[in-house]
Image: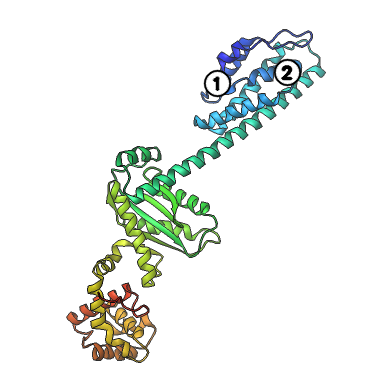
Amino acid sequence: MVGRLTRRPPVPPAPGVAPADEQWLVDVARAASRDAGGVPVELLGDYLPLVAEAAISGRRPRRAELDAVGQLGRRAAEQGVSAGRVVQLYLSAARRLWEDLPAVVRDRDRAAVRAAATAVLHVVDAAVATLADGYAAARRDLVRREETLRRELIDDLLRGDSDPGALVDRAEPFGLDLARVHQVALARPSHRLPDADPAITALEAVVFDRLGDRDVLVATKDGLLVVVAPTPGRADELGRLMHGELSRLPHGPPWQVSVGRAHPGLYGIARSYEEAREALTLAARLRVDDPVLNAHDLLIYRVLLRDQPAITELVQAVLGPLVAARGGAEPLLATLHAYVDSGAVATESARRLHVSVRTVTYRLHRIRTLTGYDPAVPAHRFTLHAAVLGARALDWPRQPLPEQG
């Protein structure tokens, strides 16, 4: 730094060479700072006197002096100065010092000048390398510290029971405005990832590009990738965006993405997370393999499962007789589900099931005979549909129905 340079003892001269002018070094430092876009002069430390001493006496820097340069690299990273700017500061300072050296060593012969240049280049090379190492080490520490803070913030946001005031303060450095409307999306790989960093990096790039780098958090939790983002234009846009990017990862497993509904405020994030997580759980239970799940589309299952005794009774009373059918209840349940989803059109049901229309008609007749409910009658079809949804939610008949208390 300028003050430090002026307090340093004068550079010892080589034989026949005038002592180095300390003010000259101060002027070089200030000019180099301007060249580097205003990088603080203090980040030069004792670098310029080291270069001047190398040019005049040929002395190489000591280990402690280089370690001090490494600490300056760490300080530059902590202050947010870019690596390119701080290296530019050092190179510009060396170039400017060398340009003015002939005024200091004008009486030297060509061999002496060549030796001075070699000594200067050695100092510059060693100093810049040590500076870069210190900068990189500090950046790694900052990234690890930021990742820890990010994970802790994500955990507390998704849990929803932390101090609101403290969360607002902790979210601010990440650009998260907790007063806005957010939604949470979860991405689940088909098998455990050995390293989630490539997926996180890919998601950050595409989500930041589409939604901006504020109000977006990307992290991992319980083996899932978690994205907290402001609500995009369409309810399913975030999920489609995430799945499309994750599917492009080389050698990556198939992904399933679930998206909670958008809710305002701090507790809205926790609520959206619970919805997204429940959507993944329901999808596994219902054997739904859709690549993108929306909590909104699974609301009916949540409603059914909230009154499990009632839905269990409905399934038992309406669909229980199907167990007596040849081949069991599963083919008849699949036919009934396809029939309802297709708008009660037998030909479309047959196409979806990859069977003949005659097979569909026969199965519908068996359902009517065994249950007493006719799928062709709208009121009966509604009861059958509710029972089928309940059966899927309870994973029946693969799993036995819960016992009634």
How far across and how far down the image is residue 189, in percent? 47, 62
Q: Residue at x 57, y 28 (%)?
A: 86
Percent position of residue 194, x then y: 55, 57
Determine the residue positioned at 43% across, 49% down.
Answer: 218
Locate residue 384, reporting x and y percent.
24, 80
Q: CA distance from mark 1 to mark 2?
A: 22 Å
Residue topped by disc 1: 42
The crowding category of the residue bearing disc 1, from other C-alpha atoms within 10 Å (few below 14, some 14 to 19, many at least 20), is: some
Residue 394 appears in the picture as rendered: yes
Q: Nearer the viewer, residue 371 or 176?
A: 371
Seen in the image, is 23 located left or right of residue 198? right
Q: How many marks?
A: 2
Residue at 30% across / 75% down in the picture?
Answer: 402
Q: Nearer the viewer, residue 336 or 372?
A: 372
Closer to us: 36 or 390: 390
Residue 337 shows which numbered tag? none
